[in-house]
Amino acid sequence: MTERCSSFTDEPLPGTASTETGWLCIENESGWGRDPFSGGTFAPEVGEAIERFAEERALRVLLIHRPGRAGGTGPRRVFVADSVPGRSSLRMFTVADYAEIPGLPVDDPAAGAPAGPIALVCTNGKRDVCCAVLGRPIAAELADRYPEPVVWECSHTGGHRFAPVVIVLPTGYTYGRVSGAQAAAALDAARGGEVSTSGLRGRSSIPPAEQAAEVAVRGLLGPVGPEVLRTMSDGAPSAGVHAVTVRHEDGRAWSMTVAAEDLPPRMMSCGKKPSPARAWRVSGLHEDGN
C-alpha cells in the first residue's frame, strides 16, 4: 500500500487550522492548478488584479465548484466571508466575467446577498492526491444530502495531511480526517447556529494555540454557538508555552497552558521528504474560580 501524507494520524487535530481571517471563494468549473492563480483560470492581468484585491483585504482566495462539476456557463458565484469572531458574515455576489471581481463592493457591509453557512471540501489533486482521493467522496455524499448549493469542492486550503478536510464558512471552523457523517454533522450544526466538535481542527481566524484551547473547552461544553467563546493568550510565550484563557459570554472562563510539542518528522505533502511536525498540547485546564 502506498504511503500517503494522510497516513500519519498521530498528529492531533486541534490547533492545525490554516490561519485566515477572510475568504474570497470564486466559482470555477474548469481544471485547477496547484493554486488559484497557476491553472489558467484567469487571464494574467485579471489574476494579478484579483490577487491584489484579495491581499489588500486579507482574503484567502479559493476556487470552488459544485461536486462533480455539474455547473453551467452562466453567471459565476463569488462568496466573501469574514471569519473574525464577533463579526463573521458571508455574502454572495455574481459576476459574468472574472474581471468584475476587483470591482465588487465588498467593503460595503450592506452589499451582496447574505448567505447561510456553506461547507468547502478540499479536493485539489494537483496540490495533493490525498485531497482528491479522500475529499471527493465526502463532497459527493454531502451534495446528495443537501440539494441546494451549500456544499462546494474547493482548491487547496492547507493541511492536506488531514484529508478529508472541510471548512465551514463564514466562521472558518476547520475539520480534518472526517467521515461523511462527521462532515454532515459539521454543516448541520453550523446551519443550526452551533459548532460540531467531532474532527474539529480549530477556527481559522485565531492563532494555533488559541485554536487548541478553544477546541478543548468546546469538548467540555458540547455543541454551542460559534460566537459564545472568545480566546486570549499571552503575547510573549515562554519556550513555546502559551497561557490561554477562553471566556464564555455568560461570564465563565477557563485558563490553561498550551505547549508546542515536537513530533517525529513526516510527509507534510505526498511525495515530499519528511519534515518536522508538532502537536499542540493542552494542560492545566481549569474553570476560573473553581
Image: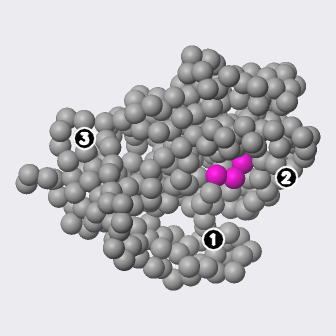
Residue type for callout 1? Met
Image quadrant containing the N terminus: bottom right
Residue drawn at point x = 56 percent, y = 79 percent: 276
Magenta stretch contains residue 52: no
The CA span between labels 3 and 2 is 43 Å
Label 1 element class: loop
Of 117 and 54, the residue lying toward us: 54
Residue drawn at point x = 68 percent, y = 44 percent: 55
The answer to whether residue 226 is left or right of residue 90 is: left
- Tell me the quarter of the picture where residue 256 sits: bottom left
The CA span between labels 1 and 2 is 21 Å
In this figure, what is the number of numbered marks?
Answer: 3
Residue drawn at point x = 50 percent, y = 49 percent: 204
The answer to whether residue 37 is left or right of residue 2 is: right
Residue type for callout 3? His
Looking at marks 3 and 2 on the same chain, the residue that comes earlier in the sequence is marked by: 2
Of 162 and 49, the residue lying toward us: 49
Looking at marks 1 and 2 on the same chain, the residue that comes earlier in the sequence is marked by: 2
Q: Which residue is mark 1?
A: 268
Residue type for callout 2? Ser
Q: Which residue is mark 3?
A: 248
- Tell me the quarter of the picture where residue 6 sits: bottom right
What segment carries the magenta color? 153-157
